[in-house]
Amino acid sequence: MHTTALLIGNSDGIGLATTRRLLSEGWSAIGVSRSDSPVESASYTHHVSDVTSLQYVRLLDRLAGDQLIDLCIYFAGIGEPIDLADMSAEVRVIEVNLLGLVRTCAGVIPGMVKRSRGHFIGISSLADELLSAEAPSYHASKAGFSSYLRSLALTLKSTGVSVTNVRFGFVDTKMAKGDRKPLMMTVDRAVNHIERCIRHRPTEYVAPQAAIPLVKLRKWTMRFTQK
Ligand SMILES: NC(=O)c1ccc[n+]([C@@H]2O[C@H](COP(=O)([O-])OP(=O)(O)OC[C@H]3O[C@@H](n4cnc5c(N)ncnc54)[C@H](OP(=O)(O)O)[C@@H]3O)[C@@H](O)[C@H]2O)c1
């Protein structure tokens, strides 16, 4: 039985495509992002809110109180190259990518635990295990993101609530940056992977699997560039 999904950061990219897919399959959905959503459906409600704001915390409280949220997916994410003349964007990346995740868990997990039912999915990245001179905040935010969800999955064992940490390689959205984007997936394929996670509820999910050796190689070569 499909019920209600709360999708955070879904005005564009993977979040938008997932929203459309879930609605086409009979889910009801509630979305949150800073911009309006292009989605029009009787089964869909969109809230304009920034995950770093106090208004977002209040919105989550209200949504978690009013609705029975069966599935929550955290997509919200930003990433910019570091600017050494003005590093304020570094703080913002951590606030959106990592603190926004934890804030969202704090808003929805207690209700799920109370009902002994629910699934929280976070969209992390294979960048979580790499260092980067170009975007330290993005890599650090995703390392913290994956670490938090892995630990939370342990905390929630035997509560009836599942947690899935999804680690994607490049996906073809405006977020995918860099001159080289090896093994880049289409958004549609990324949504197929998310659907698999909704069905099977793994604690950890990596896609594409073929990117794993590339990440290992990158880590190995970094050992030399760090010296
Ligand atoms: N694309 C890739 O190659 C790739 C690879 C691995 C992991 N990921 C992860 O996948 C997730 C989705 O990325 P994407 O590729 O779909 O990027 P995207 O197209 O840029 O979408 C990002 C979404 O996050 C929302 N967002 C950003 N800041 C927000 C804020 N402060 N409050 C609320 N919503 C906010 C944006 O909406 P508004 O601007 O309207 O707020 C947008 O809907 C991200 O967490 C990203 O790190 C992406």
Image (cartoon, helix red, strand yellow):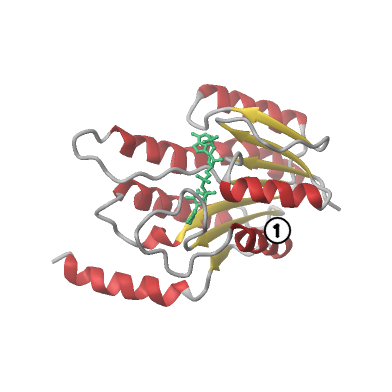
**Around disc 1, counting alpha carbons within 10 Å, would you say few (fewer than 14), some (14 to 19), or many (20 or more)?**
some
Q: Which of 56 and 86 is in front in this view?
A: 86
Name the residue beneath numbered marker 1. Answer: 198
Q: Can residue 117 be seen in this view?
A: no
Along the horizontal axis of the image, is 191 left or right of 96? right
Along the horizontal axis of the image, is 28 left or right of 208? right
Amino acid on which disc 1 is placed: Ile
Residue at (13% x, 66% y) in the render:
227
Q: Which of 102 and 141 is in front in this view?
A: 141
| Figure check: 171 above or below 114 | below
| Figure check: 105 above or below 164 | above
Q: How many labels does the image show?
A: 1
Q: Where residue 57 sits in the image (x, y, percent)?
A: 57, 27
Q: Where residue 216 sits in the image (x, y, percent)?
A: 36, 74
Q: Is label 1's Cβ within 8 Å of ligand 1?
A: no
Residue at (48% x, 48% y) in the render:
174
Q: Where residue 140 sits in the image (x, y, percent)?
A: 35, 50
Q: Is residue 217 visible?
A: yes
Q: Where residue 164 sits in the image (x, y, percent)?
A: 60, 57
| Figure check: 117 above or below 126 | above
Which residue sits furthest left?
A: 227
Residue at (74% x, 46% y) in the render:
70
